[in-house]
Amino acid sequence: MRDLLFYQDVMIKEFTANVLNTGLDGNRPYVVLSNTAFYPTGGGQPHDTGFINDIRVIDVEKVDNEIRHYTEIQYDFKGDVRGVLNWERRFDHMQQHCGQHILTAAFVELFDIATVSFHLGSELVTIDLNAENVTDEQLALAEKRANEIILENRPVETKWVNRDELSHYNLRKDVTVDEDIRLVIIPDYDYNGCGGTHPTSTGQVNLIKIMGTEKMKKNTRLSFVCGKRVLDQLAMRKRVLSDVAHQLSVPEEKASDALRKVLVSAKATEKSLGDAQETLLHYEAKELLENSDDGIVTALFENRSVQTLQKLGRAITLLNDNAIVLLVSDNGNKIQFIAARGTNGDYNMKNISDEILPLINGKGGGNASFVQGGGEKLISAQELLQHMAKQVIK
């Protein structure tokens, strides 16, 4: 492993090598080279991409003792070939991975909080910290310390050692291999066993910015970005903030206060609208009850939610303890209904739902006094209401 090009010279972008083997892994064509600068997926770091000759490399994996370069199409590689890395992707991974080492070491140094897992995503990087709670002050201090290490532009060294030599280094955590142990070292700061690729100095990480945290069982998941990703995140947030400020017709620095006022006003408006709708439903319930036949209220609607039907049904049964209410709404490609009775009634409304749900391939629920449901528009809303009414008449 130590002789691989991505370990010999982490900054190599192009190389030549001899083809050792080609094959198919299922329906995925691959090529094995005498040496490679393409990093295979491993240790939390994604694989490299690029080209071998003019054929795109879309995945790289270590399978048994060979590194397979999976290509976009099957190709008969022979002799010497030229490999070219997607350097923007590789260098981004190097920045994020090294930034993870630096930030993880800051939490250990300042608060003795260990990292238990690491994931390098396409937009954000996450580490899971062995702590149920991490304060805003701790986040700020760890971020500050990490950026100090970056600004000092310390060298990032690598060294191959055996297990007997590990005692000479103050490792952040135990290594899990017994042979070909590779250490990534930031002198006087972090010593860690790692098989990933890293820049040659901390300054190349450029910058670390913590983006947020969330609880993960007994750990805290922290998301962050490094290098160019910081600029990408800043640009995205700038666009969003500018758009919000423009829509609120305020300067960006006042957007937060203006948005808060809009939300307060919207909640008040929503409450007033809700109150008005409740009042209208009450009057609608009275009108339906007045026009009912022997206390049996039936009504058809279009595009009314089952929640509105439920409120209307309950309003009617509160006005008349003896009422039976059958409401159906035609909602495009589906039908919804409710069936209810007042407290003085003894008819089991489940009889209605049991009878009509098969007619619409529907689902529903409820109890003896109130049921609701919905299904496919296999019959018209009018026909469904007629079936419900027949059950009550029976």
Image (spheres, rainbow, N blue to C red):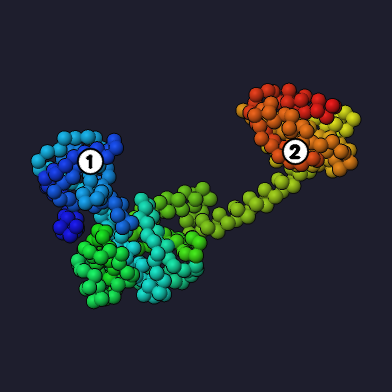
* Residue indicated by mark 1: 30
Q: Is residue 11 visible?
A: no
18 sits to left or right of 27: left
Mark 2 element type: strand
Name the quadrant containing residue 194.
bottom left
289 sits to left or right of 45: right
Which one is in front, 98 or 74?
74
Q: Specify few, some or many for label 1: CA neighbours under 10 Å numbering under 14, 14-19, or 20 or more.
A: many
> Where, quadrant-wise, is the N terminus in this rendering?
bottom left
Q: How many marks?
A: 2
Name the quadrant containing residue 358.
top right
Instruction: Tell me the amino acid under the disc marked 1.
Output: Tyr
Q: Position of residue 32 (x, y in %)?
A: 18, 45
Which one is in front, 273 or 351?
351
Q: Residue at x 73, y 26 (%)?
A: 384
Mark 1 element type: strand
Q: Residue at x 51, y 54 (%)?
A: 250
Q: Position of residue 356 (x, y in %)?
A: 72, 29
* Residue indicated by mark 2: 371
Instruction: Tell me the amino acid under the disc marked 2.
Output: Val
Asked if residue 67 is positioned above or below residue 210 in the image, the reply reads above
Asked if residue 76 is positioned above or below residue 272 in the image, the reply reads above
